[in-house]
């Protein structure tokens, strides 16, 4: 059986609106090693995944405000 470290990473492409990209860059500047954008996103996703986000029940978009944009707050990704 292959371990997860034996699998070649998959490249993905995402689009950010200017406000979210500015929030990402601000978040990166708060980190001691100033990671590039891809690494900052990878770390945020890993943090969310390691905190058991996949075991949470999905929230209704209407309940959380479908018109609101996701932002970085306190150096972590709020989903």
Image (cartoon, helix red, strand yellow):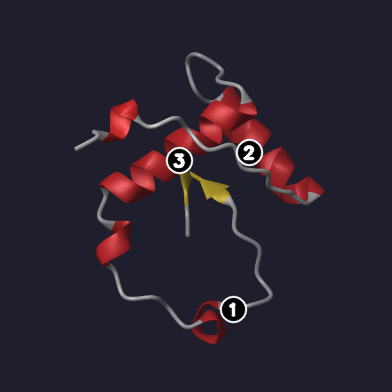
Q: Position of residue 24 (x, y in %)?
A: 63, 38
Mark 1 in CB contact with mark 3 (< 8 angstroms): no
**At 38% across and 40% down in the image, what residue appears?**
46
Q: Crowdedness of circle 1 by 10 Å Cα count: few (<14), some, many (20+)?
A: few
Residue 47 quadrant: top left
Q: Crowdedness of circle 2 by 10 Å Cα count: few (<14), some, many (20+)?
A: many
Residue picked out by circle 1: 65
| 3 horizontally vs 39: left or right | left
| Quadrant location, the N terminus | top left
**At 63% across and 29% down in the image, what residue appears?**
37
Q: Which residue, as the protein is rendered here, is positioned at the far top?
A: 33
**At 33% across and 49% down in the image, what residue appears?**
49
Separation (CA) of disc 2 from disc 1: 21 Å
Task: Compare marks 1 and 3 and give the one earlier in the sequence.
Answer: 3
Name the mark on residue 44.
3
Q: Nearer the viewer, residue 74 or 64?
A: 64
Task: Compare marks 3 and 2 and give the one earlier in the sequence.
Answer: 2
Q: Position of residue 28 (x, y in %)?
A: 58, 28
Separation (CA) of disc 3 from disc 2: 10 Å
Separation (CA) of disc 1 from disc 3: 22 Å
Task: Compare marks 2 and 1 and give the one earlier in the sequence.
Answer: 2
Residue picked out by circle 2: 24
């Amino acid at each position: 059986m292959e371990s997860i470290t034996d699998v070649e990473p998959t490249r993905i492409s995402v689009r950010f609106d200017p406000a979210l990209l500015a929030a990402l860059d601000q978040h990166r500047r708060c980190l001691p090693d100033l990671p590039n954008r891809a690494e900052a996103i990878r770390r945020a996703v890993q943090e969310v995944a390691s905190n058991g986000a996949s075991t949470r029940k999905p929230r209704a978009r209407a309940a959380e405000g479908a018109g609101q944009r996701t932002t970085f707050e306190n150096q972590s990704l709020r989903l």
